[in-house]
Image (spheres, rainbow, N blue to C red):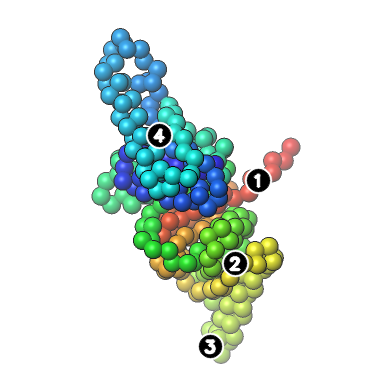
């Protein structure tokens, strides 16, 4: 099941259209969810501020109706259902996503303002769910025939690789595997070139090792390997300008234990030039 959160914004409706196409690819159902404060749903008709509560309920119902209509216009073959849920949108979506294969949100909501490139809900749920999260921003008008996955050798990066291969296979497109490194190369003088070549060779081996075995599992996916000596955000942002979808892990090799969303993933949420999927890191086993 694909879960998509809506709030009445244009970005949310674009997310619905994208989610419908994803559901069709997966032969899955689509659940459209709007989250609102609990008190309008719980109050009686004779309670104080009942008119305000009724106005909020009617507005929420209208948002869901518009979203469901948009979904059915996009593809009437997809089974669509809607739910109105009470609570904090961040917490409710994270909980609801436990039943989903993918959570889809828009890049900004009704509460956004000029300069706020990513809605606070979208930012908060990415990296906190048990399923991948898709942030729909800058969807290309026409298919470009390529997906991009960011690779850094981390466990979360491995999860992103698996998701990206499966997605590329579903779409019947190629996959560009990008590994970028920005650490300075030690050494100077006559040994500097040799040091740079050795470092680059090690980075190419890291990429090859990360991809090992995946082409055997997905022989229909053509893979292009790309290693860049530049900041990962810049390399992946550039690659996303020519892609249908960018896939990254929620945490990288440099992530702190309490940091659920890595700095590279966080930056790309704001600056990717196509829809972005953040794949969650594997759960860390608890030691007793």
- Kindly indicate whether the residue at mark 4 contacts the one at mark 3 (C-beta within 8 angstroms): no
Which residue is labeled 4 in the image?
34
Which secondary structure, mark 4? strand
Which residue is labeled 1 in the image?
284
Of the residues under marks 4 and 1, which one precedes in the sequence? 4
Residue most toward the front? 77
Which residue is depicted at the point 56% across and 81% down? 196
Which residue is labeled 3 in the image?
189
State which mark lies toward you, 3 or 4: 4
State which mark lies toward you, 3 or 1: 1
Q: Alpha-carbon distance for marks 1 and 2? A: 30 Å
- Kindly indicate whether the residue at mark 3 contacts the one at mark 2 (C-beta within 8 angstroms): no
Which secondary structure, mark 3? helix
Of the residues under marks 1 and 2, which one precedes in the sequence? 2
Q: Is residue 58 left or right of residue 173?
A: left
Q: Alpha-carbon distance for marks 2 and 3? A: 43 Å
Residue most toward the right? 288
Is residue 11 shown above or below 242? above
Q: Alpha-carbon distance for marks 3 and 4? A: 62 Å
Which residue is labeled 2 in the image?
221
């Amino acid at each position: 099941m694909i879960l998509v959160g809506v709030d009445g914004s244009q970005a949310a409706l674009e997310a619905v259209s994208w989610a419908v196409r994803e559901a069709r690819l997966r032969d899955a159902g689509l659940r459209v969810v709007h989250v609102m404060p609990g008190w309008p749903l719980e109050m009686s008709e004779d309670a104080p501020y009942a008119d305000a509560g009724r106005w909020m309920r009617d507005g929420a119902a209208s948002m869901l109706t518009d979203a469901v209509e948009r979904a059915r216009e996009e593809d009437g073959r997809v089974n669509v259902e809607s739910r109105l849920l009470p609570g904090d949108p961040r917490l409710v979506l994270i909980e609801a996503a436990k039943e989903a294969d993918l959570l889809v949100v828009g890049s900004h909501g009704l509460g956004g303002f000029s300069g706020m490139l990513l809605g606070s809900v979208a930012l908060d749920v990415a990296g906190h769910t048990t399923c991948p999260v898709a942030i729909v921003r800058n969807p290309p008008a026409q298919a470009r025939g390529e997906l991009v996955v960011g690779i850094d050798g981390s466990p979360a990066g491995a999860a992103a690789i698996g998701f990206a291969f499966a997605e590329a296979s579903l779409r019947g497109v190629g996959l560009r595997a990008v590994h970028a490194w920005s650490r300075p190369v030690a050494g100077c003088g006559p040994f500097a070139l040799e040091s740079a070549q050795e470092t680059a060779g090690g980075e190419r081996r890291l990429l090859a090792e990360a991809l090992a075995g995946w082409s055997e599992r997905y022989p229909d996916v053509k893979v292009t390997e790309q290693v860049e000596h530049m900041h990962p955000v810049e390399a992946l942002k550039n690659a996303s300008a020519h892609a249908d979808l960018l896939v990254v892990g929620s945490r990288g090799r440099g992530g702190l234990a309490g940091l659920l969303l890595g700095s590279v993933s966080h930056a790309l949420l704001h600056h990717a030039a196509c829809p972005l999927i953040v794949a969650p890191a594997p759960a860390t086993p608890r030691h007793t």
